Each structure stands twice: as C-alpha cells, then as structure tokens.
Amino acid sequence: MLAHILISEIAMSAARVKTYLTSHESTPVLDLPQLVERCMGDLAFAERCLTKFRQQLNADVERLEESVQAGDSFEAARIAHLIKGAAATVAASPLAETASAVENAARQGYSRDADLLTATTNLVEEVRRFTNAVPTFTKNT
Amino acid sequence: MRVLVVEDDWITGQMLTHALESLGYSVTVADDGEEAYRRIRSGEFRLVVSDWEMPGMSGLELCRKIRSRTSAGYVYVILLTSYRGVENIVRGLDAGADDYLTKPFKTDELAMRLRVGERILSLESRDMTIFALAKLAESRDSETGEHLERMREYCRILADELSINPQYTDVVDGEYVAQMYLTSPLHDIGKVGIPDTILLKPGKLTEKEFEIMKEHALIGGRTLESVAERHPEAAYLQMARDIALTHHERIDGTGYPYGLSGDSIPLCGRIAALADVYDALTSKRVYKNAYDHEFAKEYILDQRNKHFDSDIVDAFLSREDDFLSVSLKFQERILDSMTYEAILTTA
C-alpha cells in the first residue's frame, strides 16, 4: 500500500513522528496510519484535514462548554456527537471516545449533571493533549 | 458514476469525497437532508451515501422521502452511521436504506459497498433493456398502444394475489412477482417472425394465415430458450421462455402451440394468458373496438376451467378493482396524448 510506504518514510524521521504520535501521556492522540489510509495515502490532504479539524474542534469545544454551563443538554449532545464523528474520521480515537462519553451523559438529561461535567472536563483535557501533539505533524510535513 | 454524499460534518464530507474521487467517482456533497432531497429529485444522482444523524431531515427521513416518491430510476442509498446493532440496522432498512457503512469509514469497505450499489443499479438497466427490446418487437404493430405496460401490471397483480394463496406461497414469492413483471412484456416477442401481411391485416385471418400467426409462440419460446440455455443462472430467462411459449395454451388442452392442459402449462404461462386476454378484450385493435370491463369479466368467468385456470380466475375476481384502475389509468393517458395531438393540429 502506498500509504504504508509513505508512513515508513515518515517513520525515518523518527524523532518528529514520535513527538507527534505520543504526547506527554503514553496513548497516541491519533492513529496516523489509519488516517493516511482513509486519505488514500495523500499526506498533504491528511494534513489539510487535520488543520481544519483542529480549527473546527476549538470552536466546537467552546460552544459545548457554553451549552453545558447553560444547562442545554440537548445542544451539548448535538455538539458532542459532531466532535465524536469528526474525531473518529480523522482517527483520533481517544478524542472520539471522550466526546462519546459527553454525548451519552448529555442524553441522560439534567439528572446526570455531575457526569456531564466530568465528561466535559475529560474532553477538554483530551482536546488540549490533541492540540499540543498535532502541530508537530503540521509544521514538519 | 456520480455519487451524492450527504454529510453535515465538513471533515467527514471532505474525506469521503477525496476517497470516492480516488476510486473514480464524481462526487457532490450536500450539507443537509433538504438539499440532498432537492438534488436527488433533479434525477442527477442514483447513488447516495448519507449520514444518519443530521440537523433537520435525518438520513432515515431522507430514505423514507426518496422511497415515497415514484421515479424513473431507482436511487441506491447507503447509510453512514456510528450506530451499531441489529435494531438500528432494521430501522434503517425499514426506512428504505439499501446498505450500511459504519463510521469511521474504511476505504476498502467503502469501495466494496459502492460496487454493490453499482451492480444493483446495473440490474435495473438490464430490466429497462428487456422492456426496450419488447417494445421494439411490438413497434411494428402500432395498434396495440400500451399493451405491454398494461400486461405487465395485470401479471403483477395476479401473481401478487396468488402469493397470498396458501396453495402457491411456496412458488410465488416476491421474486416471482418481480420476475413476472420483468418478463411478461416479452410474451409476443416471436411476432418479429410473422410477416406484415398477416400481423397487420385489418380483417379476420384465414385458417392458413392463423396457423402462421400461431407460430409466434414457438418462435419466441425457442429464441428465449437458446439464450436461457447459455445462461442457466438467469432464472428470469426461463420464465420469459415459458411465458412466450405457453401464453396461448388453454387449461382444457385446446390452446397452442402444443395443446398442453392443466398443470403441465407453467404457472407463469397461465397467468399471462388471462392478463393477455383481458387486455385484448378491453383495448381497441385493428379488427375490433374495445369492450368494457364487465364484458371482459363475463368472458373470463365463462372460460373458467376452459381457457383459464380457476385459481387465476379467482385471483382476478379478488383484484378486479385493481385491473379496472390499471385499464382506466392507461386509457386516460391515451386520451391525453390524443387531446395533445388535436391541439397541435388546430394550432
């Protein structure tokens, strides 16, 4: 597969890939081979998608926090669902999972407010971890 | 081939587009269900990949809307969803989706699902080719109007009614009904082998001429047999052959070409016989005017166990109203085109 050849090329520059794949915690923020495969091996396209995703992510998380504070669990569920879908598409599984937890908590309605807050905090933390790790890839490719 | 992607998330929409374009498709993205429905209505798209959950019209609602309208061509819909589990699959299929793709999509699965869709759509092209062939064969005989269109509707109604008769449920299923609709227009295809002087003769045929006319059943049956032999996997060709060969046989053994009787006449031939006679009676031909429904009904009842199989006569009686509405629908269409021509002439 072309994607795998390209990925091994990246792997040659081990240092930057390592920075990219693993942040300060040990779980990779995204599965690069999976993303590149989904982009049909087109690295430049993968990079554009990540850049756009990050911009969209920041705006979405801001709106999510607002709706959680306003107690609008319906809107919170909708935004969390969007983040989950987009994150899964760019192969950012940990992010998709934390967004999914927010969506589930929000769908429970007001009675589970504490869960929703915890899930949102976890998501914000994962977003920070993601945005800290990804620029390395964006700058160097 | 053109594909319509319906996706409210920009990133997923872009990545699907990129992957589909790499696979050779030409892609358009609609942000929501309403826009997608507008584009589908324009007839440009027959292959749709749609997200399930979207603001406004959801993927499920879009499916239902597509299926609720009659259109010239089938629209194949693949639902893209993060929902898993049998229950959701059933909900999607129930709404009219053809297939599923789970999110996040995998490119090889995407390619495979799209190929299946293309294959299904190409089958529809096959159906249209068959009908075009039948129309071509019929075109020499301009007096028959929309005989084939009506005939296949009558065949479908009769087969559909038999499918709920316990005696026939093992044989007549949805597939049988669909095949009956597909192949019945080929019943007279052997008429291409009958000379114009006989086929288009306005008066009554002499005995000798009628013997030649009768050969159309054999010519059609043998032509289709030779194709069916080469493609034994295509069951519809066998049904087409049986219908062409036996639609003039009579249950009492007095029909042609072989004088078969009772169950030795294939069921599809027995169904086509009644549908063909009903239409011949209720429409105008070179040699006769159109009789009304009551006259045709009386004739069919009189011919129970003579010309026609009694079970098929019963099916006809149960669905009499449907026969009448098909007959009236096509009459209106003919009237419309006559009015149109009259306007053109006076203008």
Image (cartoon, rainbow, N blue to C red):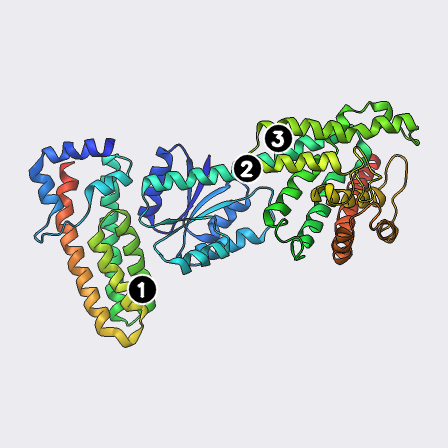
In three-dimensional space, the C-alpha distance between marks 1 and 2, rounded to whole angstroms, equals 42 Å
Q: Is residue B79 left or right of residue B152?
A: left
- In the structure shown, which secondary structural element does the residue marked by tag 3 occupy? helix
The answer to whether the residue labelled 1 contacts the one labelled 3, judged by CB atoms less than 8 Å apart, is: no
Look at mark 2 in the image and give the residue it sits on.
Answer: B123
Please give the label number shown on residue B228: 3
Amino acid type of disc 2?
Answer: Leu
Number of residues whose C-alpha sits closer than 10 Å to that of mark 1, classed few (under 14), some (14–19) or many (20 or more): many
Q: Chain of mark 1?
A: A
Look at mark 1 in the image and give the residue it sits on.
Answer: A77
> Which residue is drawn at the image coordinates 32% and 68% (left, top)?
A107
> Which residue is drawn at the image coordinates 81% and 35% (left, top)?
B256
In three-dimensional space, the C-alpha distance between marks 3 and 2, rounded to whole angstroms, equals 17 Å
Q: Is residue B4 above or below residue B218?
A: below
**Horizontal and vertical percent for residue B187?**
73, 35
Q: Chain of mark 2?
A: B
Query: Which mark is in front, 1 or 3?
Result: 3
Q: Is residue A95 above or below residue B338?
A: below
Please name whichever residue, B17 or B306, is drawn nearer the observer in this view of the structure: B306
Question: In terms of image quadrants, where is residue B241?
Answer: top right
